Amino acid sequence: MEAERPVPLWQNPFVWAFVVGCVMVTLIRPFLRFEPKPPPVLSELPAFSLVDQDGKPFGSVELHGQVWIASFFFTQCPSVCPLLMSRMAALQNRLKDEHVDGIRLVSISVDPVRDTPEALRAAAPKYGVDPARWTLLTGPLERVHDLCVDGFKVPGFDGTGMINGDIPHTTKVVLVDPSGHIRGYYDTDEQGLDEVFFRAQHVLKEARSNA
């Protein structure tokens, strides 16, 4: 008795069902992707003008129309700032490596008396600052104080001054939209920076769709 010949692979209905299933999943995947909405507006920053590491005026006018992420530091910080600034550098590099344009980083010194533009300019290479994407800011003490406390509403400048060479300040970053609205506060651990990386892009996409 002649042995039954195996069915060719291309005639096997299970193989075709698998192929069709893969194609269908690929086609409908874009429709199943969930993209979170941009974060809500929390508050509005007042107009401000400080000075960058090159001694040039820099503030709300220069930042208008851009999505930006603010952080707070000082160059002689003995505690949290080195790690904070290294994580800001990693965020800067991630934006660059993934070709995300239109999002700027801004780091404001909470020790503006000692952090002159010259001091910021000297520290910038140590932090890995790319001036095209990241700006360091300083300015008159009272102006910086008011911006941090009344504008960003972040802790620090609470009257305790310097403690053992340190100035208490927040390690969170603040997401700001092109109109100067605060859209969120994020931790600077891996999870927090990952979240702000994507949230900033959601805000950028929102701004471009409304333009």
Image: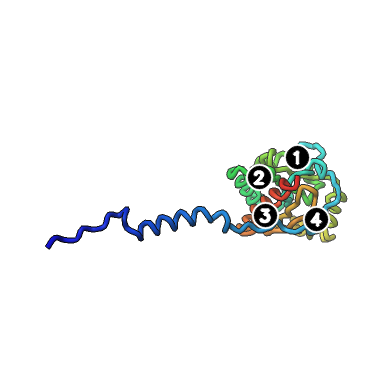
Q: Where is residue 96 in the image (x, y as percent from the top left)?
A: 61, 43
Instruction: Answer with mark 2 or mark 3, whichever residue precedes in sequence.
Output: 2
- Mark 4 residue crowding within 10 angstroms, few (<14) / some (14–19) / many (20+): some
* Amino acid carrying mark 4 in the image: Phe
* Amino acid carrying mark 3 in the image: Arg
In the rendered image, which residue does mark 2 sit on? Answer: 127
Tell whether label 3 touches label 2 (CB within 8 Å).
no
Camera-nearest residue between 54 and 192:
192
Instruction: Answer with mark 3 or mark 1, whichever residue precedes in sequence.
Output: 1
Secondary structure beneath label 2: helix
In the rendered image, which residue does mark 1 sit on? Answer: 53
Q: In this view, does 111 lie to the left or right of 204?
A: right
Instruction: Answer with mark 4 or mark 1, whichever residue precedes in sequence.
Output: 1
Quarter holding residue 187: bottom right
Tell whether label 2 touches label 1 (CB within 8 Å).
no
Tell whether label 1 touches label 3 (CB within 8 Å).
no
* Amino acid carrying mark 2 in the image: Tyr
Q: Which-is-in-front pick, marks 4 and 2?
A: 4
Spatial CA distance of label 2 from label 3 is: 24 Å
Spatial CA distance of label 1 from label 2 is: 13 Å
Quarter holding residue 93: top right
Instruction: Decide: is 133 above or below 81.
Output: above
Secondary structure beneath label 3: helix
Split into 4 quadrants, where in the image is the C terminus? top right
Q: In this view, does 15 lie to the left or right of 89?
A: left
In the rendered image, which residue does mark 4 sit on? Answer: 152
